[in-house]
Amino acid sequence: MRKLLRTFPVSITLLVVLAIASGVALAAHAGHAVPATSCRPLNAVDAVGAPAIAVTQPCQVPAFTESDVGDYIAANGFPGGKAFAADGVTPVIPAISRVSFVPREQAEALLQGESLGSIPPGTLVCYVEFAGPIHVNPNTIMYPPDLSGSPGQIVMASGHEVFDARTGNLLNWGLLPPS
């Protein structure tokens, strides 16, 4: 009897552990999400760029979707400038012509050699391209005045933004002139 009393707490503990383990296995088998135990978010030292797109797929790369990109652009616009609606008067956000999740090196090629050197080689980024013409925001970049002394209107062929696919942070944005 004494031996049974000594092993009773151990037996109860083992039963509880087995019940929890089988519950997790059943949940996984039934298609329910089981929390990941090996996911480690980037710490502030690892993360670069400015906070931008919210992470909607934690512990995955990419950590957000094409739809999340569209939602972010719709809410925040493009910092490089505006396009105009069909009426030629109403300013609008330039249309997104491309969203690609690509390695850093491929994005740099799309940026015509501009470096994204602050992130490790091979890191997945989200390259977003905007269709032109884009009328540059005069507060965004410096440009020479026209002959009358007022700021000249600059129109660019296209624009881009690059986001870290792990964090959603904005790494780079820019404009490409007409060829």
Image: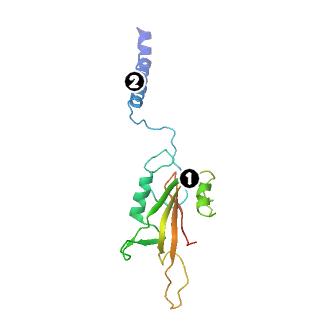
x 39%, y 63%: residue: 75
Mark 1 highlights which residue? Answer: 102
Q: Quadrant of the N terminus?
A: top left
**Which is more foreground, mark 1 or mark 2?**
1
Residue 153 percent across, percent down from the top left: 49, 81
Dot 1, crowdedness within 10 Å: few (<14), some or many (≥20)?
some
Measure how far apart labels 1 and 2 are at the Cα level. Answer: 44 Å
Residue in the image at 39% along x and 24% along y: 19
Q: Which of the 4 quarters of the picture holds residue 96?
A: bottom left
Element class at badge 1: strand
User: Where in the figure is residue 59, as x and y percent of width and height?
Assistant: 49, 44
Please tell me the numbered disc located at residue 19.
2
Q: Disc count in the image?
A: 2
Q: Residue at position x 41%, y 25% from top?
A: 22
Say what amino acid the circle numbered 1 marks. Val
**Mark sitting on residue 15:** none
Vertically, is 14 above or below 90?
A: above
